[in-house]
Amino acid sequence: MNQIIPPRGGIVSGPAPYPTLPPEGGRALERGDRSKGSSHLQGGGREGGRSESDVAKRASRPTPPRLALVALSLSMLMPSLDASIANIGLPALSSAFAAPFQTVQWVVLAYLLAITCLIVSAGRLGDLIGRRQLLLIGIALFTLASLACGLAPTLPFLIVARAVQGVGAAIMMALTIALVSGTVPKERVGSAMGLLGTMSAIGTALGPTLGGLLIAAFDWRLIFLVNVPVGLINWGLAYAALPADRPQPIADKKAARFDPIGTVLMALTLAAYALAMTWGEGHFGALNIGLLAAALVGGVAFIATERRVAAPMLRLGVFQRPGLSLSLTLSVAVAATVMGVFVVGPFYLGHGLGLSAGAVGLALSAGPMVSALSGVPAGRLVDRFGTRRIMLMGLAGMVLGLIGLCVLPMLFGVAGYVGPLMLLTSHYALFQAANNTGIMQGIGADERGVVSGMLSLSRNLGLVTGAALLGAVFAYGAGGVGEGVDPAAIAHGMRLTYGLIGGVLSVGLVAALRRMPGKA
């Protein structure tokens, strides 16, 4: 299915330099305290084949914080760009390989499925072997797979290469957020999260435009080959600027092992769910129901396995942290909301208000544009006022935006749609910056990778769920979405869909008011 991936919220860059070393290791080395410095290094062993003394020398060298943030920003931009740039190339790929759309769409699905299935496992693996080291591997894998995509001789080869590219993207998306806490001080984490959100929004919004220009001027291969020089720059910056991190020493050797059974069960469960949501373009049949049943069975098996193994991929006790489960659930709901708006919007603007395709694209572009521009102030507000206040403000603004989308277009036409859309996407940026920061604050260093992966996973699940379920709700309310549908029926389907998700977010807002920790 040709999926539309909406942007996430954004943030701020900090002009003032700040330390990039883990506090305990950096201070010990600066003071020349050999006992503390050596004990800090003992847990890390070797990094990339280098000796402990080499790692210590690297850790003692200050790295430019701006370059570190540039490296993390590129690591977020590239996967987001490739999530949307391939959509615009599907017609060209169908012609180039003489293949039907149902086959060509796997160029998009293979990438999204790989990210969805492996993003949590990538975070866990980063916790075990070192996040910086694994991020470098992920960037290299993404870049090499992009080269393979651009040189693909056949469609099956391209689909496999896109799946490998998705593996690299999963590593990059999971570990980029996890590395923020070790790169910037606590009081600027909100700003850093906002910056990453802005880069994600820019990548998502830029993908279709850049892809269209490259295909028109050159060839479809350029939409993949453009990643190669950017990937090489990203790898070099990450290698030079990101602070060296080492896994935390774990007394129990069994607890430090990777969990292959849990990894496979989670991957199969998520793959079954994602395929159930994407196959059939919103029309659920026996295959979709069977896949959902398989996902349910797989989820139960995964939980049972994680309770028994000595080194679970996902420690279920982490959900006992106040507010974490609710924050992840809200992340799913908010991502589904934005996806629903971008799925329904083209139909309403085109068939309901009679706009041309160009005018529809221009009207909807206001959403990603505002989301990207809101990232910097959103991050600063989080740093100043705390995560809880800004998260609640973001949810409340999104509810008001949905109410406006239900009412104002009937009174003011296109302006009545674009205005509430801008309100919704700007407050989406507020929610994302606050929610991402709140989730990552207080997480132990040995679990930042896996929790970061869960955060990214919640967004991806929201996207696929919103596209499938909310698209089905809209089709039901409009009585169909084909040519010749009455504009009044389209408007009814739009109001039904936006009213439903507005009600869901209102419930989430009330739950957040009651259950979110009061401390910022």
Image (spheres, grey):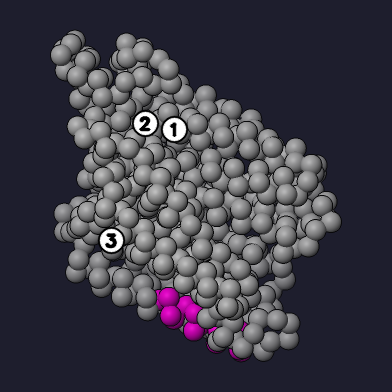
Between residue 117 and residue 356, name the one nearer to us: 117
Label 1 is placed on what type of residue? Leu
Q: Position of residue 148 (x, y in %)?
A: 69, 37
Q: Quadrant of the N terminus?
A: bottom right
Residue 127: image x %, image y %? 34, 37
User: Of the residues under marks 1 and 3, which one precedes in the sequence?
Assistant: 1
Q: Which residues are magenta?
A: 488-502
Q: Which mark is residue 325?
A: 3
Characterize the local packing of mark 1: few (<14), some (14-19) or many (20 or more) Cα atoms within 10 angstroms: many
Residue 391 — which label?
none
Q: Give how far apart the Cα atoms at labels 1 and 2 are.
A: 6 Å
Q: Disc 3 residue type?
A: Ser
Give the residue at mark 2.
Answer: 130
Query: Residue at image x 41%, y 58%?
Result: 458
Mark nearer the viewer, 1 or 3:
1
Magenta stretch: residue 40 in it? no
Vertical arrangement, residue 234 with respect to residue 203, above or below: above
